[in-house]
Image (cartoon, coloured by chain):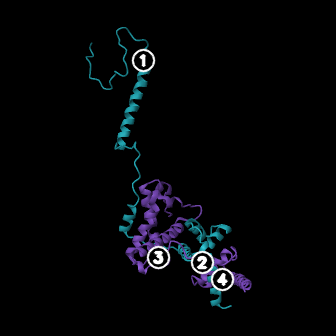
Chain colours: A cyan, B purple
Amino acid sequence: MDEGQERALWRRWRQAQAQNRGAEIDPMALAAYAEGRLLEEDADAVEARLALEPALIEDILFARNATPTLAPAALVARLKALPPAPPRRHWQGTTPWWGALAASVMVASFVGFSLGHDAYLSFAGPTQPGVEAVDQADFPLFTLAEDSGR
Amino acid sequence: MAFEVDLKALTQGDRAAWDAFVRRYSGLVMAAVRGVARERVEIEDLTQDVFTRLCKDGFRLLKTFDPSRAGMSTWLTIVARSTARDMQRRRQLALSPLDNVPESALATSSPPPERLSLPKDLLSPRQALVLSLLYERDMDVAEIAAALAIDPQTVRSTHHKAMLKLRAHFAEEKGDGG
């Protein structure tokens, strides 16, 4: 049988297989095949698909011998700008980071002062006559100097 | 030194990770699409199309990458070439006058193939692939052996066995019909 007859036989087989094209091949499977990392039955599935779309074999050959080139700076800048900004969560306001830090310090100071004042009251004993009990909520953090001589 | 990109951070929207990914792989993608296009402007546009596809829909395509199955360079090259061919095909169809577009490109379904009764597994996948590369890609035995990482003698043997099967099957068909 000469090559012409063999090609004719192949063409007949190929025509009948055209209807069995099946789903698009998974790039991950092709990549694994290119690296020789597929098990035999998975490799068979890829080869069956390649037989129907033999141009894909060039992708495999190219991937095995890929040599990166240098992308122009302008193109790289365009590519970097591609993804849209991630959506802001509703709790993310416009408060800068140091605002959160300052608030944390204030809260920690107030809690620390409250605990310290409670400890002082417990050591100081029962309240003396004439001495008013101080409500924490009324005690200001910063006070004007009183007349200490009274 | 290996240059690692934090893919998890990237797919969660980390800009620094995306920038690192672009710096790392833009040259590879450009080289990949260069095999599909020729003009510099077209190559750059196709490169951008590839990266657009990668970050589309919350990095949906990029999230399908599995490092346990293959390397990023290999996967990305295959994705890049496939995307470039698709985009190029669409652009060519959009630019061509309708009369110049072949009917097959406009058809919503392929014309019915010749009605042949072929057993599903008449040829093994490897046999079918060897014949396909020989007769559709016009590759020679050495090229096929290199592509499939097998011995040239194995290619010849696979070809021979496949031909025997096809010959026997179509000879039977002819005998039944006659």
Given this view, does label 1 or label 2 mark the residue nearer the observer? 2
Residue A121, numbered label: 1
Residue B106's place in the image compared with B9, above or below, is below
Q: Name the residue at 45% across, 17% down.
A: A122
Q: The disc numbered 4 marks a residue on which chain?
A: B
Element under disc 3: loop
Instruction: Identify residue for label 4.
Output: B152
Element under disc 2: loop
Residue B16's place in the image compared with A62, above or below, is above
Q: Name the residue at 51% across, 58% down.
A: B63
Q: B15 or B110, which is in the foreground?
A: B110
Task: Confirm or deny contact between disc 1 and disc 2 (CB under 8 A).
Answer: no
Residue A103: % across, % down: 37, 36
Residue B113, numbered label: 2
Element under disc 4: helix
Task: Answer yes or no: is residue B145 visible.
Answer: no
Instruction: Identify residue for label 3.
Output: B36
Q: CA distance from mark 1 to mark 2?
A: 96 Å
Q: Are marks 3 and 1 on the same chain?
A: no
Three-letter amino acid code at the position of disc 4: Pro
On screen, residue A35 versus residue B5, left or right, reads right
Residue B8: % across, % down: 50, 55
Q: The disc numbered 2 marks a residue on which chain?
A: B
Three-letter amino acid code at the position of disc 1: Leu
Q: Name the residue at 36% across, 43% down.
A: A93
Given this view, does label 4 or label 3 mark the residue nearer the observer? 3
Task: Confirm or deny contact between disc 3 and disc 2 (CB under 8 A).
Answer: no
